[in-house]
C-alpha cells in the first residue's frame, strides 16, 4: 500500500501536529511511514506544506502529481498546492466557503472557520477537525477512526478527550457535506 | 525496539546510546531540536551529561572540542551557516585531533527554507579534511551517530554528521537500542604541548602531514566498511548512480516508478572517498551520474569521462532534490527521453502571497514602526540582523541582512560611507551576545556615529525560544552592563503595547543622539508573544475590530504596521481576523489616523 498526503496551511494552524498524529498512527500499526515538517521561519504565519508518505517510500518529499490527498487548512493554501495531487484520483479536503473555485480534482469543502466563529469548534482544533472530515470523506484514507483516536491519545493524553470530541463532531458534520 | 522519531530526536537518542556526555551548540533551524532532546533523554534515562546552549557556534564547538581533548565523547550542534562561525576552530581542530570522540552535527537547509545560504556542509568537511556522514532518513541518522563517534575515537579526529532539513524534520519508525548502558567517560586532560599547542610552522606542518595520511587511511576504511559490502550487489550495465543522503531516496523511487535500469551505489560517507577504487568500478558501466545535495562534493573527488553531475550541467545545482530532477538528469545525459510524470499544473489565477511575518502582538512590530516614524526612511539606513525581527522586512523597516551580528559593523561602515543619513541598526538579544559585542567595541573606540537598538525578548525566538544567557542567569548577566562595559552610552526602555509611548521614547533617543559623537545603544526590553512564562502578563486581552465607517483605506496599517489579522475585505475596508488577533491593544487609538481600530465588543 502506498498513500501520499500533503498537508497545507498557514504557520500556526497546526499542520505539523497532523504530521505527528499520522506518523504515530502509522507507527502503532507498524506501517512504514515518512513524514516531514516545516520549522523555524516558515512557522511564522507563512505558507506551510508538510508531507506524509505511508508505505514503501525512500524519499521524504512529495513530487507534483503524486499525492493521493491534500488536506488544506485554508482555501488559498489548498489552491497553492493542487499541483501535488494525482491527475487521476487526487482528492482535496479543504476548509473553505462557497467561494472556493471549481477545480479538476475531487473536492470536499467544509467551512471550518464558520464553525469556529459560531463557537461550534475551538479555532485551535481546526487541524483535528479537518482530519475528522478526512476520516469521513476519504474512503481510501489508510487510517480509521480508531487508529487516529489511539494516536491522539499517545501524542497528548491530557488534550485527547477534547481533540477526540472535535474528531467526532467533524465526522457528524461531514454527513451533510 | 521500535520508536517513532523525528530526525533530530533520533540523533539525540543516538548520542545517548553512543555514550556521549557533553553536547554544546547554538540553535539554528533545522538543527535546533537535537540539544534539547539530548537533555530530555539524558534526564529520562538518568544519565549525567552536560547539555548547554553556547553564546555562539564557535564557543559551542570549542567547549565540545576541549571535552574531546580531555577524553570525553562530545558533540556540537549547529546549522550550516553556524559552521561558518565555528570554522576557525574546526580548521585547526582537524589538524590537532583529540583523545576522546567528537561529533560535529551540521544541519543543512537545501531550498533555503530558513537560511540565508544553501551551502553544503559536506564540502566544508572536505575543505577541513574531516570525514562526513550523510544520512538519508532518521533511522540512518541514528545509526550514523554511533558509527561516526566510534570512527572519531578510532582516528582521533572530529567527524561530521550532515543531516538536511528533510532528515532533521522527518519522522519515521526507527529501530533503536533496547537499553541505555550509559557510562560517563573519564575526563582527564593529559598535557602534551607538542600536540595541543602545536606551533607553526614546524608543529603544524607535521600535523598537516599526519592529517593527509589520516584522510587516506579513512578513505580506505570507507571502502572496506561502507562501500565494498554494497559493491557486491551491483549488476553492471548501462548506468551507475552514485548517491548521497536524501539524493538516494529520490533516485530509488524515480528509477523504480519509471522502470529505469540503473545500479545505485549509496555513499554513506561522501568524504573522504577511495578515488581509484571507485573509478575502477566505472569500467563496468557506460555512464555514471552523481546525485547529491547540493554541492558537487562527491563529483569533485572523482574524474572520468563517464562521470556526469553538476559540473557537467546535467544535474541541478541549487534547490532541494526531487524525483523530477532525477528524470531531468537522466534526460540531460541522454539515457532517456521521458516526459516527466512529476510535473503538474499549478492553480492558474494569482494567489495572495503569504510570506512569514512577525506574530500578531509581537513587540518588534511596534518598535520598528516607531523607528520609522521618528527616523524617516529617506534620511536613514536601517541595518539589521538574523532573527525573528528580520521579518520586519514586511514593514519596510530593514535595509540590509547579511549574517549573524553584521548589523553593528555594517552600521559602522554606513556611518563612514554616507554621512548624510542616520544609521539605525537593530539586533536581537541573542544575536547581540552571539556576535554583536566585538563590533560594538570597535564602534566605540573608532567613534562611529549610529544608533544600535537591541531588541531584547529574552529568548532565541525564531529557533524555538531557547533561553538566552541573560534569561538563564537573571541578575548576573545584564545586557546594559555589557553595553556600558564596552564603553557605549546606553538607554533602556521597557516596552508596553502602546505605540504612542514607543514613538515618544524614540523621539528621546533622537534627541540624545544629536549630542553623541559615537554609538548610542538602546535596549528595548520586550517579550515574545509565544513565551508562555512571560507573555500572558504582558498582553492585556483587549481585542481589536474595525469601525468600517471610519476606515478610509489609507494603507498605513497594511504597509507600515503589517499585523497579520489586518486585511481588506470585499468592501475595501480593513477587517481584523478574530482568530488571529491576540488582544495586545497596540493598534487601538494610536495606529490609525482616523481611529478606525476600536475595542471588539464581546458577544
Image: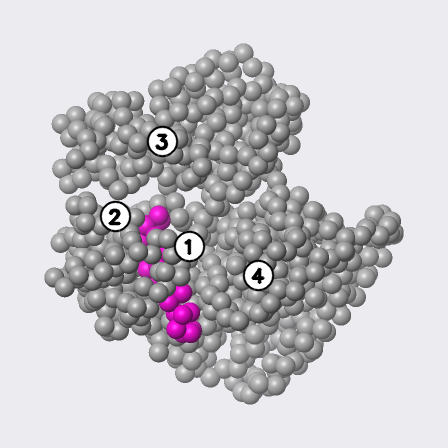
Are the residues flagged by discs 2 and 4 in contact, CB closer than 8 Å? no
- Identify the mark at residue A38; answer none if there is no mark: 1
Res B65 visible: yes
Res A86 visible: no
Residue tagged by mark 4?
A: B13
Q: What distance separates the C-alpha of mark 2 from that of mark 3? A: 21 Å
Q: Nearer the viewer, residue B64 or B374?
A: B64
Q: What distance separates the C-alpha of mark 3 from that of mark 1? A: 27 Å
The chain ID associated with circle 2 is A
Q: Relative to B85, does residue B450 appear above or below in the rendering? A: above
Colour scheme in use: one colour
Are the residues flagged by discs 4 and 3 in contact, CB closer than 8 Å? no
Please provide percent x and percent y for residue B18: 65, 63
Report whether B25 appears left or right of B361: right
The chain ID associated with circle 1 is A
Q: What distance separates the C-alpha of mark 2 from that of mark 4? A: 35 Å
Magenta region, residue range: A5-33
Report whether B365 appears left or right of B189: left
Q: Earlier in the sequence, mark 4 or mark 3?
A: 4
Please provide percent x and percent y for residue B395: 36, 34
Residue A18 within the segment the image draws in magenta: yes
Please provide percent x and percent y for residue A35: 41, 64
Question: Is the residue marked by circle 1 packed among few (<14), some (14-19), or many (20+) residues within 10 Å?
Answer: many
Hey, which quadrant is residue B304 in on the image? bottom right
Q: What distance separates the C-alpha of mark 1 from that of mark 4? A: 21 Å
Residue tagged by mark 3?
A: B539
Are the residues flagged by discs 3 and 1 in contact, CB closer than 8 Å? no
Residue B111 within the segment the image draws in magenta: no
Q: What distance separates the C-alpha of mark 1 from that of mark 2? A: 23 Å
Question: Is the residue marked by circle 3 packed among few (<14), some (14-19), or many (20+) residues within 10 Å?
Answer: some
Residue tagged by mark 2?
A: A122
Find numbered disc 2 in the image and state the secondary structure of the residue it sits on. Answer: loop
Amino acid at each position: 500500500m502506498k498513500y501520499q498526503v500533503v498537508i497545507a496551511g498557514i504557520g500556526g494552524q497546526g499542520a505539523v501536529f497532523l504530521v505527528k498524529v499520522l506518523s504515530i498512527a502509522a507507527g502503532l500499526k507498524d506501517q512504514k511511514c515518512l513524514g516531514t515538517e516545516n520549522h523555524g521561519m516558515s512557522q511564522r504565519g507563512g505558507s506551510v506544506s508538510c508531507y506524509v508518505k505511508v508505505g514503501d517510500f525512500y524519499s521524504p518529499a512529495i513530487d507534483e502529481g503524486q499525492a493521493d490527498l491534500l488536506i488544506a487548512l485554508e482555501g488559498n493554501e489548498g489552491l497553492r498546492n493542487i499541483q501535488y495531487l494525482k491527475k487521476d484520483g487526487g482528492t482535496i479536503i479543504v476548509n473553505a466557503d462557497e467561494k472556493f473555485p471549481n477545480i479538476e480534482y475531487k473536492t470536499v469543502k467544509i467551512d471550518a472557520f464558520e464553525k469556529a466563529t459560531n463557537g461550534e469548534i475551538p479555532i485551535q482544533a481546526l487541524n483535528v477537525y479537518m482530519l475528522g472530515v478526512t476520516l469521513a470523506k476519504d474512503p481510501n484514507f489508510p487510517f480509521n477512526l480508531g487508529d487516529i483516536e489511539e494516536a491522539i491519545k499517545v501524542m497528548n493524553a491530557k488534550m485527547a478527550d477534547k481533540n477526540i470530541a472535535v474528531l467526532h463532531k467533524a465526522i457528524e458534520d461531514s454527513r451533510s457535506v | 525496539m521500535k520508536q517513532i522519531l523525528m530526525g533530530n530526536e533520533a540523533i539525540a537518542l543516538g548520542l545517548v546510546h553512543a555514550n556521549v556526555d557533553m553536547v554544546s551548540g547554538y540553535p539554528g533551524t533545522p538543527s535546533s531540536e537535537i540539544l534539547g532532546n539530548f537533555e530530555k533523554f539524558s534526564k529520562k534515562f538518568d544519565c549525567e551529561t552536560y547539555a548547554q546552549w553556547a553564546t555562539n557556534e564557535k564557543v559551542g564547538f570549542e567547549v565540545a572540542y576541549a571535552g574531546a581533548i580531555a577524553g570525553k565523547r562530545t558533540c556540537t550542534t549547529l546549522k550550516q551557516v553556524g559552521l561558518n562561525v565555528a570554522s576557525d576552530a574546526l580548521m585547526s581542530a582537524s589538524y590537532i585531533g583529540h583523545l576522546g570522540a567528537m561529533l560535529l552535527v551540521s544541519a543543512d537547509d537545501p531550498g533555503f527554507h530558513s537560511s540565508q545560504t544553501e551551502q553544503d556542509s559536506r564540502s566544508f568537511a572536505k575543505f577541513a579534511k574531516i570525514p562526513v556522514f550523510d544520512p538519508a532518513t532518521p533511522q540512518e541518522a541514528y545509526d550514523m551517530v554511533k558509527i561516526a563517534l566510534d570512527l572519531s575515537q578510532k582516528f582521533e579526529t572530529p567527524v561530521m554528521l550532515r543531516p538536511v532539513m528533510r532528515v532533521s524534520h522527518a519522522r519515521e519508525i526507527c529501530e533503536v537500542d533496547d537499553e541505555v548502558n550509559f557510562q560517563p567517560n573519564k575526563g582527564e586532560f593529559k598535557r602534551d604541548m607538542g600536540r595541543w599547542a602545536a606551533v607553526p610552522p614546524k608543529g603544524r606542518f607535521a600535523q598537516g602531514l599526519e592529517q593527509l595520511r589520516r584522510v587516506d587511511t579513512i578513505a580506505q576504511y570507507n571502502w572496506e566498511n561502507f562501500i565494498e559490502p554494497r559493491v557486491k550487489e551491483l549488476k553492471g550495465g548501462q548506468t551507475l548512480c552514485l548517491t548521497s543522503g536524501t539524493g538516494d531516496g529520490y533516485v530509488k523511487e524515480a528509477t523504480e516508478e519509471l522502470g529505469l535500469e540503473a545500479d545505485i551505489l549509496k555513499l554513506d560517507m561522501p568524504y573522504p572517498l577511495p578515488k581509484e577504487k571507485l573509478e575502477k568500478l566505472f569500467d563496468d558501466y557506460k555512464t555514471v551520474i552523481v546525485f547529491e545535495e547540493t554541492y558537487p562534493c562527491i563529483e569533485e573527488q572523482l574524474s572520468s569521462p563517464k562521470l556526469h553531475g553538476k559540473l557537467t550541467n546535467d544535474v541541478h545545482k541549487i534547490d532541494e532534490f526531487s524525483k523530477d530532477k532525477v528524470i531531468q538528469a537522466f534526460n540531460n545525459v541522454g539515457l532517456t527521453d521521458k516526459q516527466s510524470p512529476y510535473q503538474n499544473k499549478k492553480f492558474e489565477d494569482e494567489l495572495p502571497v503569504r510570506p512569514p511575518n512577525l506574530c500578531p502582538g509581537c513587540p518588534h512590530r511596534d518598535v520598528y514602526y516607531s523607528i520609522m516614524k521618528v527616523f524617516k526612511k529617506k534620511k536613514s539606513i536601517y541595518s539589521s540582523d538574523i532573527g525573528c525581527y528580520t521579518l520586519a522586512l514586511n514593514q519596510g523597516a530593514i535595509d540590509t541582512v547579511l549574517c549573524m551580528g553584521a548589523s553593528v559593523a555594517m552600521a559602522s561602515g554606513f556611518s563612514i560611507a554616507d554621512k548624510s543619513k542616520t544609521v539605525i541598526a537593530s539586533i536581537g538579544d541573542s544575536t547581540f551576545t552571539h556576535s554583536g559585542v566585538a563590533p560594538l567595541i570597535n564602534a566605540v573606540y573608532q567613534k562611529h556615529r549610529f544608533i544600535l537598538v537591541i531588541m531584547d525578548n529574552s529568548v532565541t525566538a525564531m529557533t524555538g525560544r531557547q533561553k538566552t544567557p541573560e534569561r538563564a542567569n537573571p541578575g548576573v548577566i545584564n545586557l546594559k552592563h555589557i553595553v556600558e562595559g564596552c564603553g557605549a552610552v546606553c538607554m533602556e526602555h521597557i516596552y508596553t503595547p502602546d505605540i504612542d509611548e514607543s514613538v515618544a521614547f524614540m523621539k528621546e533617543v533622537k534627541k540624545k543622539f544629536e549630542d553623541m559623537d559615537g554609538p548610542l545603544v538602546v535596549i528595548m526590553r520586550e517579550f515574545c508573544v509565544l513565551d508562555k512564562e512571560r507573555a500572558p502578563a504582558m498582553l492585556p486581552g483587549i481585542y481589536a475590530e474595525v469601525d468600517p465607517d471610519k476606515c478610509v483605506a489609507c494603507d498605513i496599517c497594511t504597509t507600515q504596521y503589517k499585523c497579520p489579522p489586518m486585511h481588506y475585505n470585499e468592501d475595501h475596508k480593513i477587517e481584523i481576523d478574530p482568530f488571529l488577533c491576540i488582544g495586545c491593544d497596540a493598534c487601538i487609538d494610536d495606529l490609525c489616523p482616523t481611529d478606525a481600530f476600536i475595542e471588539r465588543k464581546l458577544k
